[in-house]
Image: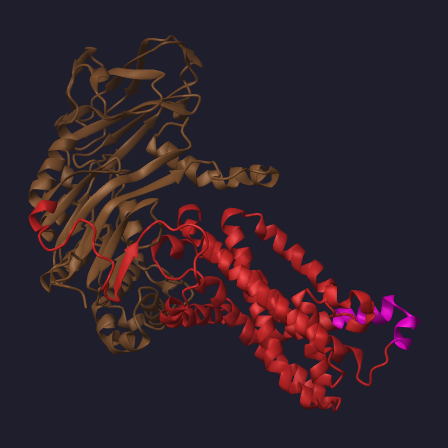
Chain colours: A brown, B red
């Protein structure tokens, strides 16, 4: 049997490369004509990742090495596109690595989604068996745990109703109930807690804590830093497919939060080396202007107008410009996304050096810290992509007539609203 | 967690010897891969559940339920019989030298044909239709196209009741040749799984397969002795013709039910080619399956 001293998971130089729209071997006419179809998913990936179009490939993760000891609950943290999901997919054997290897010692259950394989036409009872089998349970095991699963899910009354009649909350509860009755040695969990109501999330967290306490090894990806801090004893931080650091979960969460909010050093952005793109046009500075006074600021009142000003430089005219701006919250989760293509007001040709402005009539974000990613494209190819090019700090001000604003913990996006009432007549 | 702190017990590269049975090595694969029957066996219950799901879903919310399995070949039988009597005219009667009526002759071939064409059509779309499963969880991918055969088998069993009824009505009794039937059915199963898995793997990369398959099946029907007898194919071409697995299998299926002389050489060739199709199909599938999750 497995030596207890062996780590549960050993990852050595693991790497995953995605082809972008090109086939590995020679393309005959049939392939060429069909290439467009195969390209489509990658084209999306490319635009999401902002990796250079000139290259035919990108590495979602590379040179990744780490170990997970038996009984560890390891959090995997990093921004969107850092390679967390790819890593989980490799360790779950869903997709194959391009290089390196990983050894997993023990029975694995991976939950990359709640309710994988659920079928809407089937009843709750039937879905418990189907989903259980998909997650790797034997029929005898499901039979034995059936009552427990039903009780935990709280849908016993609707057990023979097709789940298409269930509310989404009921579906999630049923799905998590099946998943939490798995009995693996190693669990791989991705963002499962992002669904369901608050009370149910707490129950799930409790279940996961039990799993950890009973000596199981857990790999956990989440944007919920509080959950990572609470559940995990260790964490690794990923960025652009590389391992940045590893250590006790609390320290890593702190470092990550600090990193996200403080990476942007105001001043000359052209010094930064952590950028992607072919470099035909480069971002040199990003200023936030309070429109009223047209002066650079780092804080802005909620509800106030804001102009994001991007300084750029290049060798030649900047042709077919397209500017992307992502605004992320304090843990790096995108809150909103702005793109010059949405309004198509930019001219087709810009001078080699200049400034680009994005005017927001009002900042509709809760009082919190935000980071701003900027990406410049020319002819649909990424020229320069900078994460956290600037920080934005939103302070209290008047968005609503009363001057009241919700705390950021309740949600970061504000919207105008009006209220009214009417009597209920029988 | 620093690597140095616990490197005392294990070297940087874990030894591959004495690997416990439940540990998994994740490495890049290239070239052809073995079928890994042991793993398929381990996941047999999942195969059963996937087939069971398809059966359940197929008959939920359909008014006639299992009757659909009968209606389809029955309608085809009626249409083709009509075409034969109306379109072919007088000559058609004279070349019918059998002791049993044409509709029975037709139905006995439509039955295995429906099984084959249904399995090929369903399994060729199965991977694309299971994109969500493929990108969220690991299991041997081969189970997906194979499990679709479940519904085909069930339909086949249901619609063979009609055949038994028709044969009883016309007092047709099969002779000892009926003992070959299981081998023929096995061959048919292998051929449909082989072609289905191959098409399903192609469909992941080339969505065109969706449009090609109905067309392919239509042509295939005419390249198979369903509407006509195997004897109508010139003798010198017959062996070549039976490289089409359904040709020898379906005509033998009919012959051994009605006690017509079996053409053993044709059956052997078709059995052989269905095995080849099965082996090629499943190995091709194994070769390309590692890309599925990335491109589906």
Task: State which quarter of the image contains the N terminus of chain A.
Answer: bottom left
Q: Is residue B167 left or right of residue A362?
A: right
Magenta-span inclusion, residue B93:
yes
Which residue: 63% across, 75% down? B70
Task: State which quarter of the image contains the C terminus of chain A.
Answer: bottom left
Q: Which quarter of the figure has residue A377?
A: top left
Of A237 and A400, which appears nearest the observer? A237
Which residue: 49% across, 50% down? B204
Q: Looking at the picture, does residue B238 appear above or below residue A425? A: below
Q: Looking at the picture, does residue B189 appear above or below residue B173? A: above
Q: Looking at the picture, does residue A73 appear above or below residue B246? A: above
Q: Which quarter of the figure has residue B179?
A: bottom right
- Residue A359 in the image: x percent, y percent? 29, 19
Q: Is residue A130 left or right of residue A334?
A: right
- Residue B87 in the image: x percent, y percent? 86, 66
Of B274 and A34, which appears nearest the observer? B274
Q: Which quarter of the figure has residue A144?
A: bottom left
Residue A161 showing in the rendered view: no
Number of marks in the rendered image: 0
Residue B114 showing in the rendered view: yes
Q: Is residue A100 left or right of residue B287?
A: left
Secondary structure of the magenta portion, mostly?
Answer: helix
Which residue: 82% across, 85% down? B99
- Residue A105 in the image: x percent, y percent? 21, 60
Of A34 and B184, which appears nearest the observer? B184
Magenta-span inclusion, residue B287:
no
- Residue A180 in the image: x percent, y percent? 22, 64
Which residue: 45% across, 51% down? B31
Q: Give, as a single range, the part of the protein colored magenta.
A: B78-95
């Amino acid at each position: 049997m497995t030596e207890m001293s062996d780590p549960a998971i050993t990852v050595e130089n693991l790497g995953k490369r995605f082809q972008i729209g090109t086939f590995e071997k020679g393309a005959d006419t049939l392939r060429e004509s069909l290439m467009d179809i195969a390209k489509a998913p990658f084209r999306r990936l490319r635009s999401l990742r902002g990796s250079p179009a000139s290259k035919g490939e990108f590495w979602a993760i590379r040179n990744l090495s780490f170990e997970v000891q038996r009984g560890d609950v390891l959090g995997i943290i990093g921004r969107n596109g850092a390679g967390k999901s790819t890593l989980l997919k490799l360790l779950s054997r869903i997709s194959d690595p391009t290089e390196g290897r990983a050894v997993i010692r023990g029975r694995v259950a991976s939950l990359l989604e709640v309710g994988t394989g659920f079928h809407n036409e089937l009843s709750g009872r039937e879905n418990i068996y189907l989903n259980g089998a998909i997650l790797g349970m034997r029929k005898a095991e499901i039979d034995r745990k059936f009552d427990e699963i039903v009780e935990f899910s709280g849908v016993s009354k609707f057990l023979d109703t097709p789940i298409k009649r269930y509310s989404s909350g009921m579906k999630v509860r049923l799905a998590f109930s099946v998943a939490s009755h798995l009995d693996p040695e190693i669990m791989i969990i991705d963002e499962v807690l992002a669904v369901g109501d608050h009370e149910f999330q707490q129950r799930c967290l409790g279940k996961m804590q039990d799993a950890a306490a009973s000596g199981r090894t857990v790999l956990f990806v989440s944007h919920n830093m509080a959950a990572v801090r609470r559940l995990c004893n260790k964490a690794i931080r990923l960025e652009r497919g590389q391992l940045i650091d590893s250590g006790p979960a609390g320290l890593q969460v702190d470092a990550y939060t600090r990193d996200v909010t403080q990476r942007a050093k105001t001043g000359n952005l052209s010094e930064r080396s952590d950028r992607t793109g072919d470099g035909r046009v480069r971002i040199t500075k990003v200023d936030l202007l309070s429109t009223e006074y047209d002066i650079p600021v780092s804080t802005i009142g909620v509800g106030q107008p804001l102009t994001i000003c991007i300084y750029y430089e290049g060798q030649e005219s900047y042709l077919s410009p397209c500017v992307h701006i992502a605004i992320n919250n304090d843990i790096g989760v995108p809150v909103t996304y702005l793109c010059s293509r949405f309004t198509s007001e930019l001219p087709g040709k810009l001078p080699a050096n200049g400034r680009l402005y994005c005017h927001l009539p009002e900042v509709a974000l809760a009082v919190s810290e935000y980071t701003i990613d900027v990406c410049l494209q020319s002819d649909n190819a990424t020229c320069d992509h900078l994460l956290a090019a600037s920080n934005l700090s939103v302070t209290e001000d008047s968005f609503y007539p009363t001057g009241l604003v919700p705390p950021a913990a309740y949600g970061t996006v504000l919207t105008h609203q009006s209220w009214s009432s009417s009597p209920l007549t029988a | 967690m620093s690597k140095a702190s616990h490197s005392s017990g294990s070297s940087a590269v874990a030894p591959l010897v004495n690997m416990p049975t439940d540990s998994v090595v994740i490495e890049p694969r290239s070239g052809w891969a073995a079928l890994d029957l042991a793993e398929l066996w381990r996941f047999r219950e999942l195969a059963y559940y996937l087939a069971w799901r398809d059966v359940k879903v197929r008959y939920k919310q359909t008014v006639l339920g299992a009757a659909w399995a009968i209606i389809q070949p029955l309608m085809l039988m009626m249409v083709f019989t009509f075409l034969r009597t109306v379109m072919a005219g007088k000559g058609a009667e004279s070349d019918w030298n059998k002791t049993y009526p044409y509709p029975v002759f037709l139905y006995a071939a439509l039955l295995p044909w429906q099984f084959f064409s249904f399995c090929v059509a369903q399994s060729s779309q199965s991977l694309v239709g299971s994109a969500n499963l493929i990108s969220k969880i690991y299991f041997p991918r081969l189970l997906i196209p194979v499990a679709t055969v479940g519904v085909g088998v069930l339909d086949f069993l249901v619609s063979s009741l009609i055949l038994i009824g028709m044969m009883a009505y016309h007092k047709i009794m099969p002779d000892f040749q009926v003992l070959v039937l299981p081998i023929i059915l096995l061959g048919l199963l292998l051929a449909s799984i082989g072609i289905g898995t191959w098409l399903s793997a192609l469909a992941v990369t080339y969505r065109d397969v969706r449009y090609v398959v109905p067309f392919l099946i239509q042509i295939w029907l005419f390249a198979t002795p369903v509407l006509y007898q195997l004897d109508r194919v010139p003798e010198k071409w017959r062996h070549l013709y039976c490289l089409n697995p359904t040709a020898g299998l379906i005509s033998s299926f009919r012959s051994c039910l009605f006690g017509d002389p079996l053409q053993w050489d044709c059956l052997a060739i078709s059995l052989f080619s269905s095995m080849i199709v099965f082996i090629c199909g499943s190995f091709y599938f194994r070769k390309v399956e590692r890309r599925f999750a990335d491109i589906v």
